[in-house]
Image (spheres, rainbow, N blue to C red):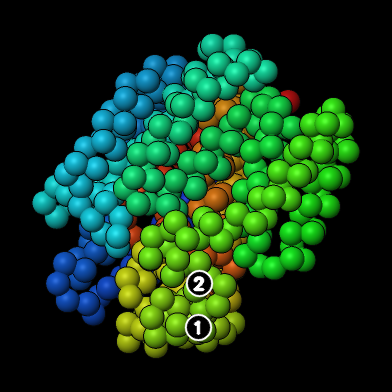
């Protein structure tokens, strides 16, 4: 009992077991959806298995490091990630309309995965060591440039989904650091208004009412409140303008999100087929490698962004629930470090990691059941992708390292 207590005090077994369940689901899903494929895809399971073993070794190495190690490597790691993001724009490989990969023989490396960790580590370092004042415009500008430089480079790669991940992560870290809630409202409310304007007048009215209530709580100057509210009201008319400047494939994604049935054999095909796959799984699923949608290849490249459909069809409601529970446990345990982490630096890094994993999890599963538009967000630890698995595992290793040095309260 004492040995078990000593282990639990230095290692969060709940996060680790959740991680093992998710990676196991990933390997099973990738195996089932690619084993009967031909060409390079047939080797996806073996490549993912090798990356899983390598990731576990890396997890142990990262776990053994101190907070000072992550602090010290954050700046050079950030510079390296920016270099790779620029390099991929010059010599990158285009897959699914996104120029996001560097190819090294049979291995494709996605620099944006490195950039997620590097940006979180360096932004946390900058925010804690420079005594940032969020009432000072210069401090806001410099802090934002650290986060949004990789975001802009990723947007240039035409990887909209990953750029959203960066925005959510950066804003979350700013908010936790003490960013003025009024400024956060000014930044986010127009974006939410524009997004909700796709769904008609009722959601806009509800959000405007929520904004009015938030302004009442925050109590800014009455003139400022009027300006904010009027700007948000005007923003509701921006959607058509923004829609007109989107690229054709981005317009298709918006149209499919609003009405997948409008193009059932084209852009809406994947969403409709994933719903069929998940819905047909029933309570316990059709069994491993027995899913019709999966084995008959109704969903193209289902081992990536739509891997939840494989799990839902073959493992049913039980498998999907276990997947959701595992993510929930992992995220809950990570959130507990918000208050028990050893320092402000480790707390900010924890917030960044929690934010990007949570966004990936919610949007990836939401895409497969039609709650969110298809924006190319993989499911962490589950979807195929060696570089994504490796750097997501590094993120978990950092969390476990912080857990080891946490403060008891």
Where is residue 366 drawn, in percent x and y?
Answer: 56, 65
The residue sitting at 65% across, 57% down in the picture is 237
Residue 175, placed above or below residue 344: below
Residue 203 placement, left or right of 128: right
Q: Quadrant of residue 247?
A: bottom left
Circle on res. 262: 1
Residue 283, placed above or below residue 407: below
Residue 190 placement, left or right of 53: right
Residue at the disc numbered 2: 255
Where does the C terminus fall, quadrant-wise?
Answer: top right
Q: Nearer the viewer, residue 378 or 34?
A: 378
Label pair 1/2, CB-CB below 8 angstroms = yes
The residue sitting at 32% across, 87% down in the picture is 296
Secondary element at tag 2: helix
Q: Nearer the viewer, residue 140 or 398?
A: 140
Q: Nearer the viewer, residue 324 or 284?
A: 324
């Amino acid at each position: 009992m004492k040995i078990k207590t000593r282990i639990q005090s230095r290692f969060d077994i709940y996060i680790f077991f959740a991680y093992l369940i998710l990676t196991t689901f990933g390997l099973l899903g990738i195996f089932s959806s690619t084993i009967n494929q031909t060409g390079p895809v047939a080797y996806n399971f073996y490549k993912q298995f090798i990356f899983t073993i390598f990731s576990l070794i890396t997890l142990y190495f990262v776990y053994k490091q101190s907070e000072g190690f992550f602090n010290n490597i954050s700046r050079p790691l950030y510079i390296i990630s920016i270099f790779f993001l620029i390099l991929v724009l010059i010599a990158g490989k285009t897959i699914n309309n996104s120029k996001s990969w560097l190819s090294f023989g049979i291995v494709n490396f996605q620099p944006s995965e490195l950039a997620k960790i590097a940006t979180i580590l360096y932004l946390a370092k900058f925010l804690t060591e420079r005594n940032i004042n969020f009432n000072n415009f210069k401090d806001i500008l410099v802090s934002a440039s650290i986060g949004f430089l990789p975001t802009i480079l990723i947007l240039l790669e035409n990887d909209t989904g990953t750029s959203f991940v960066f925005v959510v992560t950066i804003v979350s870290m700013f908010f936790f650091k003490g960013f003025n809630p009024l400024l956060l409202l000014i930044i986010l409310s127009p974006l939410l208004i524009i997004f909700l304007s796709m769904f008609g007048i009722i959601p806009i009215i509800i959000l405007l009412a929520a904004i009015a209530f938030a302004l009442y709580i925050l109590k800014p100057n009455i003139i400022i409140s009027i300006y904010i509210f009027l700007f948000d009201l005007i923003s509701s008319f921006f959607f058509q303008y923004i829609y007109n400047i989107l690229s054709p494939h981005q317009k298709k994604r918006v149209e499919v999100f609003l009405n997948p049935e409008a193009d059932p054999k084209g852009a809406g095909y994947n969403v409709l087929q994933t719903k069929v796959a998940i819905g047909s799984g029933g309570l316990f699923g059709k069994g491993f490698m027995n899913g019709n949608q999966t084995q008959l290849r109704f969903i193209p490249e289902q081992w990536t962004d739509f891997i939840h459909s494989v799990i839902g069809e073959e493992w049913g409601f039980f498998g999907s629930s276990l997947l959701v529970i595992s993510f929930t446990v992992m995220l809950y345990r990570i959130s507990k470090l918000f208050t028990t982490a050893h320092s402000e630096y480790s707390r900010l890094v924890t917030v960044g990691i929690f934010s990007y994993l949570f966004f990936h999890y919610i949007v990836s599963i939401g895409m497969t059941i039609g709650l969110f538009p298809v924006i190319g967000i993989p499911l962490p630890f589950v979807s195929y992708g060696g570089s994504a698995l490796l750097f997501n595992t590094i993120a978990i290793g950092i969390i476990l390292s912080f857990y080891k040095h946490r403060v008891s309260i």
